Amino acid sequence: MEKRLILVFCLWAALGAAAQQSSSSFTVLRLPASSHAAALGGENISLVEDAPSAAWANPALLANVSDNSAGLSFMTFTAGSIKLGAHYVKAFGERHTAAAQLEVMRYGTMDETDLAGNVLGTFAPRDMTLSAGYGYLFSDRWTGGATLRMVTSRYADFSSVALAVDLGLNYYDDETDLSLSAALRHAGAQVKRFDDVQEPLPLSLELGMSKGMAHAPVRFHLTLVDLNRWSRHIYYKEDDGKKMPFSRLLLNHAVFGVDVLPSEIFYLSAGYHFRRAYELKAAGKGHLAGLTLGGGLRLKAFGFGLSYARYHAAGASLMGTASYTF
C-alpha cells in the first residue's frame, strides 16, 4: 500500500512539473487555514500539530490530529474582507482519519456599475470552499493523505465552480522531532467558468522540513513551494535589464519559519516569505514585508492561536484559530 501511494504521488508530481502556469484563479486556495502555519510564513506542509486546522495544507498530517476534534478560524484580509472557517476531524480505528472543512471568504460590499460608470446597485462577492480530507497511517513514522475540494465563487451575476485535489506524504520521527513532507496541492480544473475562458487553478508542488533542536526549545521550518514553476518571468524583478540570478529564483520558492517553545503548552513563531517580500517591496510596502509573527497555546483539550501577516499591499492580516477535542 505504501509503495502504491508513493507511485501515485510521483505521477501527480510529474503532472505538476509539466504544468508551469504564470497565472491562476481561485487563489483563495493558497491562504492558510491555520494561524500557526500563517505565523510560519503562510505556507507550511510539515508542521505536526494536534489541531484540526493544521492539516489542510498537507492531508497526510491528519493522522496526527486527535479523534473528534473541532475548530473555528477567522482571517482579516484586505479592507472589508474576512475569511471564516470551520473544521472537524474524526478518527476511525488506529489508521484512518477523516476530516471536513468549510471556509467562506467575503470581500465586503461593492458598487455595481454599468460601462458609463453609473451605479446600478451593490453586490457582495464571496468565495466558498468545501473540503473533505482523508489521512492514513502506514507505520509509526509514515502517513499519507488526500483532500477533495469544491470551490465556488460568485461576483455579482457571475459565478464559477472548480474541483481540486491535494495529495500528501509525511515522515515524522518524534524522537528526533524531524518531519519531512511532500505535497501536490490544488490539482484540478474549473467545471463552471465565469465566461468562455478556462482559468487554471494555483497548482503547487511542495516539499517541506521541520526540525526541532535537541538541546534548545526551538524548531526550524523550511517549505519550498511552486516547484512546478521555474519560468523567471513569473517572479518579480527590478527592471534593470539583467537576467534574474538562479539564487534569486530559488528564494522565490522558499518560506522559512521558526518556533520558540518555552513550554509544552505555549509557542511563539516567526516566518519569512521571500516572494511575498519582493512583491510587497515593489508595491511600496517594504515595512515588515514578507515577515509573519504569531503565537498560541494548548491547554489539555483546548487550543488557540493568533498570527500577523501581510499578503497584500492594501493592508495587514490577522488570523486566529481555536480548537477543542471532545
Image (cartoon, rainbow, N blue to C red):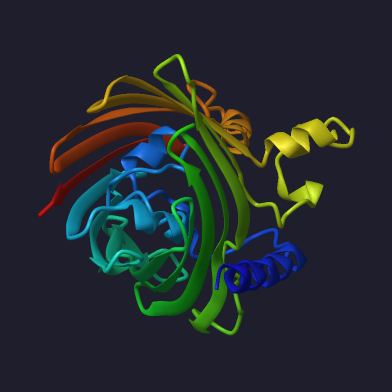
314 relative position to 101: left or right? right
Q: Image quadrant of residue 102?
A: bottom left
Task: Name the residue: 23% across, 65% down.
Answer: 90
23 relative position to 297: left or right? right
The quadrant in which the N terminus is found is bottom right
- Is residue 94 visible to us here? yes
The location of residue 47, given as percent across then percent down, is 43, 42
In this rendered view, identify the residue nearer to me: 116 or 151: 151
Q: Which residue lies furthest to the left in this view?
A: 326
In this rendered view, identify the residue nearer to me: 7 or 131: 7
- Is residue 28 visible to us here? no
Task: Name the residue: 78% across, 49% down.
Answer: 233
The location of residue 80, given as percent across then percent down, is 28, 47
The quadrant in which the C terminus is found is bottom left
Q: Image quadrant of residue 201?
A: bottom right
Task: Name the residue: 35% across, 31% down.
Answer: 308
273 relative position to 315: left or right? right
The location of residue 226, given as percent across then percent down, is 65, 52
In this rendered view, identify the residue nearer to me: 24 or 41: 41
Position above or below: 223 against 146:
above
In this rendered view, identify the residue nearer to me: 138 or 217: 138
Q: Residue furthest top?
A: 215
Task: Name the residue: 56% across, 77% down.
Answer: 189
Position above or below: 87 against 307:
below
**What is the tally of numbered marks visible in this picture?**
0
The location of residue 292, given as percent across then percent down, is 43, 29
164 relative position to 203: left or right? left
